[in-house]
Image (spheres, rainbow, N blue to C red):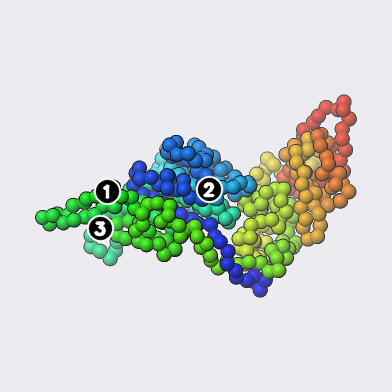
Amino acid sequence: MLSKIKSGKIQRAQKVFLYGVEKIGKSSLVAKFPAPIFLDVEKGTHHLALDRWDIKTADELYETITWAIRERHNYKTLVIDSADQAEKLMSNEVIKENHWKSIDEPGYGKGFTALAEKFQSFLDDLDLVISREINVVLIGHAHIKRFNPPETLEGYDRWEPKLAPKDSEKAKAWADAVLFATFDIKVIGSDNKPKGIGGRERVIYTVRSAAYDAGNRYGLPEKIKMNIAALAPLFKAAEIEKPAFVPDKKTVLQAVFKGLDHAQLTTFLVNRKQLQSNQSIFDIPDEYAHRIALDPARFQKTVSEYKPADSGEEDKPTQAEMDGQTLQGIVDRVWTSEFEGTNYYFATINGRQVQTTDAELGEDLLEATGEVIATVKSTGKPNKYYLEAFEYPEASKTVETEVVK
């Protein structure tokens, strides 16, 4: 399998974590990044002329990230403003899910461990945005924390992102560039007492020091002016070694997908946000396809064992449903997908999925509109059926929306 993969150079979207002191203009700077869309969690961009989404809950945050992954749009930079406010929404969600009064309630750091898991999932979703060649920028605030390195006898104060410690480390490890924005203050000595002067020029530090966290992979100078021109290296053709498929992606994936249940595979890829339900399974992003090809056995095992979140007892088909029945209702959507040389035809009827490989029946299904009565057989999976035939009901019949014998 790996013999079909070779290296090539392509452009890569950037992952940037810009944090800094209050009211220094972080949002104004990021607004000059390529074609940005702001997820405004902090409600602090009202003075800027830009495209934004007002985010009030963790669910809204996840939904807009999913939109950026799945939908077609012309934005080139997704901005989370701010990371610490987004973390607060996640913290509220963790507290609500566990019926706690606060994130500290369970003790022993268990609350922050649960929060770190949710924050990591958030970063994983942002990686999917990156896979669509869309830059991602986290904007964050800074605060002063006491730092006690083991190699020194005494600790000292330093600037750090205003996140929970575990989340801060995850965000810094995730980013290609961690940038600290502050005012340039010079320290001079006077009567053996240090004194800070200045404070008007805005600067960005790009390399870690004892006073702050920073770092980058682009060879930026240690201190740069806080303007978009100084950050130009981030948006030049930062080419990296990345695998490409030979002779083509589809050839590789056909071998990996062979033997897997098509419906389950499609559901898995859709729920992993790698595919839209009306796309072919071969339309997954190249980066995800490469990850599959690196360990096909693991992928096949994962798909085979996958159970959708909505597959609880209440959704399991009854014995009557297993024995065959008719499904009457409105055709919501129809689509096709090709797998191992076979064309599959799909439709949803009142939210329940039907499928067939019969070409004549499938072509008729593609033209179906309105209400139908479908003869179906259960696949053994919740709300998924094999289509055996369908017809249009008589106009005088009452529309039914449930499965009946």
Q: Nearer the viewer, mark 3 or mark 1?
A: 1
Does residue 217 lie above or below 276 as drawn?
below
Choose top left, top right, bottom left or bottom right for residue 383: top right
| Badge 1 density bin: few <14, some 14–19, many ≥20, Cα 10 Å | few
Q: Secondary structure at mark 2?
A: loop
Residue farthest front in this picture: 229
On the image, numbered disc 1 is attached to which residue?
199
Name the kind of residue labelled 1 in the image: Gly
Real-space Cα separation, disc 3 to disc 1, in angstroms: 25 Å
Q: Depth check: 35 or 284 in front?
A: 35
Does residue 3 lie above or below 39 as drawn?
below
Q: Nearer the viewer, mark 2 or mark 3?
A: 2
Does residue 133 lie above or below 61 as drawn?
below
Picture disc at residue 155: 3
Q: Earlier in the sequence, mark 3 or mark 1?
A: 3
Q: Depth check: 304 or 239 in front?
A: 239
